[in-house]
Image (cartoon, grey):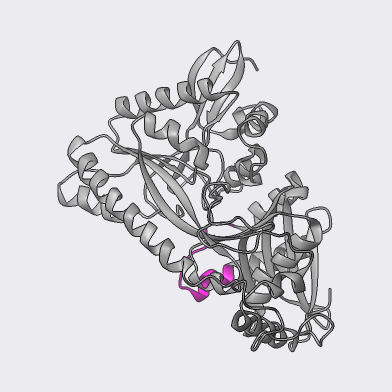
Amino acid sequence: MTQPDGFRLFPAIARIDARQWDALVDASAASAAPCVRHAFLRALEESGCVGGRSGWTATHATLWRDGSLCAAMPLYLKAHSWGEYVFDWAWAEAYQRHGLDYYPKWLGAVPFTPIPGPRLLGRDDGARRELLAALLGQARESGLSSLHLLFPLDNERALLEAAGLMIREGVQFHWENPPASANESESPGAGAACSVPPRRWAGFEDFLASLAGSKRKKIRQERRRAAAHGLHLQWLDGHEARDEDWAFFAHCYATTYALHRSTPYLNADFFGRLAHSMPEAVRLLVARRDGQPVAAAFFLCDREALYGRYWGCVEDLPFVHFELCYYQAIEYCLEHGLARFEGGAQGEHKLARGLLPVRTYSAHWLADARFRGAVDDWLARERAGVSHYLDELAEHSPFRHDTETPGSAGAGPTAGAERAPRPPR
């Protein structure tokens, strides 16, 4: 249905034409993660993970010209700060101490998904700029405390800053092939902080050869321990995975949250809808013993990257987490020509396994000038702290120095030597 020109908010993604939304995604990034696409957002809403009593109320921002969608943003009214992975609880507490309401707040983000990607979807910069200006006007008129955009692309920062939003920095750990050097700080959302060999890896052993000897030895040991469980591993996409595979994974996912005394954000209906609506974008890695599933990991995938999301195990199987969530993911990227594996939020333990720290970003606007000034000052100091943290991590790069060869002391097996076994696939 043709829409009148101008800025409009929609209470459901289903009321926006999927082809027009996804066309804006394609126009906004060379290869955007699947999570910002119409089908992903619709699965969240229609499965009940978003909406209802979840604290996420869809209010998607759109801009229309000549009856067509020219800019858009996944937008929500939030009644809390759960499921965001950018923590503003201290800001909410400060508002409360001064007798002010922090919630509800405006939030431009993909629910429960800390994957950097385009947040200002648009045909061109002019349309994105116009959408952002209209959204800020809406935020001011609403009387609500704030507007936040989580995990935008690095190339969206200038537009956000020019509009008056404050930039916050965070850190994630990504694996790249070919890896970015310390001087090449361009990655979707961020830049690598550690220098690594500039050549492309042909396979997992080639990748291992580029690591420091102690790191190679540790990875080989962990993979031997995982292989000792006698598991058979199988990668499935949405076309191949059966209903029982998704049911098992949903059980694993819920079990992981229960072990951490937490409530899962997603449900089995969401995963089933996603597999049906965008089967090419989902990957399920299932581990079986004697034909019975015992563990599973869930990933998103596009033509450039694999995105680690969730995992679970119904038994206590040491080192299977590392095997499924990191080493198998890296192997998958190498075997399928993917340039990047994003390991999700936080996790310094990922550095020793070849995932490098990268900056991530968020943008924030606060209506109250007093709090805006205080938060702006605090963010400047936090950004300095992030830079210092990245400098420290760079000193602990997992990759070998040029003077170390794969056959040097502590390096482990060289080409042709016995290799650590890995679970069959």
Q: Nearer the viewer, residue 376 or 217?
A: 217
Q: Is residue 13 left or right of residue 9?
A: right
Q: Specify the segment rendered in magenta.
A: 254-266
The residue at the point 64 percent across, 39 percent down is 37
Q: Is residue 420 left or right of residue 222?
A: right
The residue at the point 21 percent across, 47 percent down is 95
Can you give x and y, in whole percent of width and height, for residue 351 in the image?
54, 70
Q: Is residue 299 magenta?
A: no
The residue at the point 59 percent across, 65 percent down is 355
Can you give x and y, in whole percent of width and height, for residue 389 in the image?
39, 63
Farthest front residue?
Answer: 403
Q: Nearer the viewer, residue 207 or 337?
A: 207
Q: Is residue 282 visible?
A: yes
Q: Is residue 88 visible?
A: no
| Residue 132 image-quadrant placement | top left
Q: Is residue 258 magenta?
A: yes
Rendered-image quadrant of the N terminus? top right
| Residue 292 image-quadrant placement | bottom right
From this view, report whether residue 320 is shown above or below residue 9.
Answer: below
